[in-house]
Amino acid sequence: MYLHGMQELLFIVTESPDGGFTAHCSSTSIHTQAETMEDLKHAIIEAVHCHFDDNQKRTIRLQIIKEEVIAA
């Protein structure tokens, strides 16, 4: 996907059963995890910079999946 000339990357974010969050990119093999959402955002940016060894600007979109179990 491209947004105004920038490549857009979509990350699917889920809560880890052990605590914290995990994220994986839907279009490339980038995976990362962190204890807090703020730390996860920094980890995603760092992982994207490591994966793509260039200076191209990218837009990162997070799709946050929250699972809740309720009794009925």
Image (cartoon, rainbow, N blue to C red):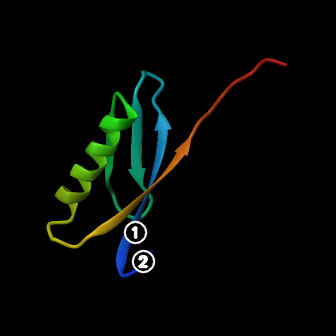
Q: Are marks 2 and 1 in contact (CB under 8 Å)?
A: yes
Q: Position of residue 7 (x, y in %)?
A: 36, 73
Which quadrant would residue 41 be assigned to in this image?
top left
Q: Residues within 10 Å of mark 1 (few under 14, many from 20)?
A: some
Which mark, by number, is residue 8? 1
Q: Give SS at disc 1.
A: strand
Q: Position of residue 49 (x, y in %)?
A: 20, 58
Three-letter amino acid code at the position of disc 1: Glu
Taking the spot 33% from the left edge, 39% from the top edge, the residue there is 40
Say which residue label 2 marks. Answer: 2
Position of the N terminus, as image quadrant, is bottom left
Q: Is residue 12 left or right of residue 49?
A: right
Taking the spot 42% from the left edge, 77% from the top edge, the residue there is 2
Taking the spot 27% from the left edge, 43% from the top edge, the residue there is 43
Which mark, by number, is residue 50? none
Three-letter amino acid code at the position of disc 2: Tyr
Q: Is residue 18 above or below residue 32?
A: above
Q: Is residue 55 left or right of residue 38?
A: left
Q: Give SS at disc 2.
A: strand
In depth, the one of 27 and 56 nearer the eye is: 56
- Which residue in the rendered view is the most extreme toward the front? 4
In depth, the one of 24 and 64 nearer the eye is: 64
- Which residue in the rendered view is the most extreme toward the right? 72
The residues bearing labels 2 and 1 have C-alpha atoms spaced at a distance of: 5 Å
- Which residue in the rendered view is the most extreme toward the top? 71
Compare marks 2 and 1 and give the one earlier in the sequence: 2
Q: Position of residue 25 (x, y in %)?
A: 40, 56
Q: Is residue 38 above or below residue 3?
A: above
Q: Residues within 10 Å of mark 2 (few under 14, many from 20)?
A: few
